[in-house]
Amino acid sequence: MDPLNTRSLTMPVGIVRMVEVVLTCVVFSLVASVEYIDSSYWAWCMFTWCFCCFITLFILIMEFTSLHVRVPISWDDFTTAFAMLATLMILAASIIYPTFFVCSSCSRQIAATVISCLCFIAYTMEVGLTRARPGEISGFLSTVPGLMKVLEAFVACIIFISLEKVNGAALEWCVAVYSLCFIFALLIIILTICRLLALCPFPFDKVLTGYNVLAVIMYMTVVVLWPLYSFRDNPRPSNCNQCYWDKQVVVSFMSCVNLIVYIVDTCYSIHLVFITPA
């Protein structure tokens, strides 16, 4: 039996993770105690707080019991990727929830928003503490291109929860681009965590650079086609309150965000592969 690693709970990262578990549990409980709202954004926020609480608690238990050394994955890559993803998810929830579901007299909703912002600060601290440990993390997901892949997958998730009405070949192409790029980014993350990148029969860095260039080209078409065909002869309804028109604006904006991320990712990859000397 593996010895209990009490040091994992007393280290700064361990303390921050325990704070994260408490805060996410409290904010989830506060929002759940108010009412159920039939909205994809509300469901996303609830999933975010519950998911982050569960996975953080799982990491704490695995490291406390020293079972993480027996897991056949890159544990450092896993914890790094999750901390980055949780930071982005909590940030999105901290913006989306008060924007759509908080009023001036909603005390519990306001409290939940404040605690969610504290959760975001805690996860940001974890990312900083994890990245600050020299020599302990050297996996792909702790590099700039790796973290970019996490960001690209996250932005795609925001796009997916905002999709509703998709009519016409142009918009279907946009959805196909979102899906293909998300699947590829998720595949890279999974292969990295499972330590399977070595099985790739081609140079991984060059394949990744080529994919990034292709993704930039595809997202350029999306940035043009989605607003063109979504808003053409389609003005905003006068009684629109979180209606499909607003969600199409979100999709348009997040498409631009992901295009910028892919461009930065591509430039960084090209610099590493073709400019930086080996």
Image (cartoon, rainbow, N blue to C red):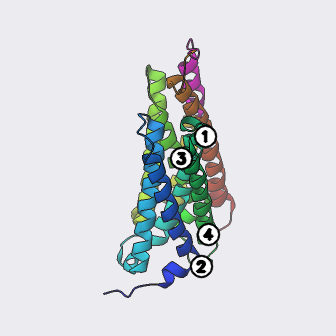
Q: Would you place residue 205 above or below residue 221 in this image?
A: below
Q: Amino acid at mark 2?
A: Gly
Question: Of residues 103 and 197, which is closer to you in this image?
Answer: 103
Quick one: SS at disc 2? loop
Q: CA distance from mark 2 to mark 3?
A: 43 Å
Magenta residues span: 220-237
Residue under circle 3? Answer: 108
Any mark on residue 135, and which? 2
Q: Would you place residue 277 above or below residue 108 in this image?
A: below
Estimate the x, y position of residue 216 in percent, counting from the top left. Answer: 58, 40
Q: Which of the 4 image quadrants contains residue 270?
A: bottom right
Q: Amino acid at mark 1?
A: Leu
Q: Can residue 231 be found in the magenta stretch? A: yes
Residue under circle 1? Answer: 259
Residue in the picture at 49% in, 24% down: 244
Are the two marked residues, 2 and 4, in contact with CB atoms closer than 8 angstroms?
no
Residue in the picture at 55% in, 74% down: 15
The disc, 3 or 1, on the residue closer to the chain's N-terminal end is 3
Quick one: SS at disc 1? helix
Residue under circle 4? Answer: 131
Question: Is residue 269 at all visible to an observer of this figure?
Answer: yes
Quick one: SS at disc 4? helix
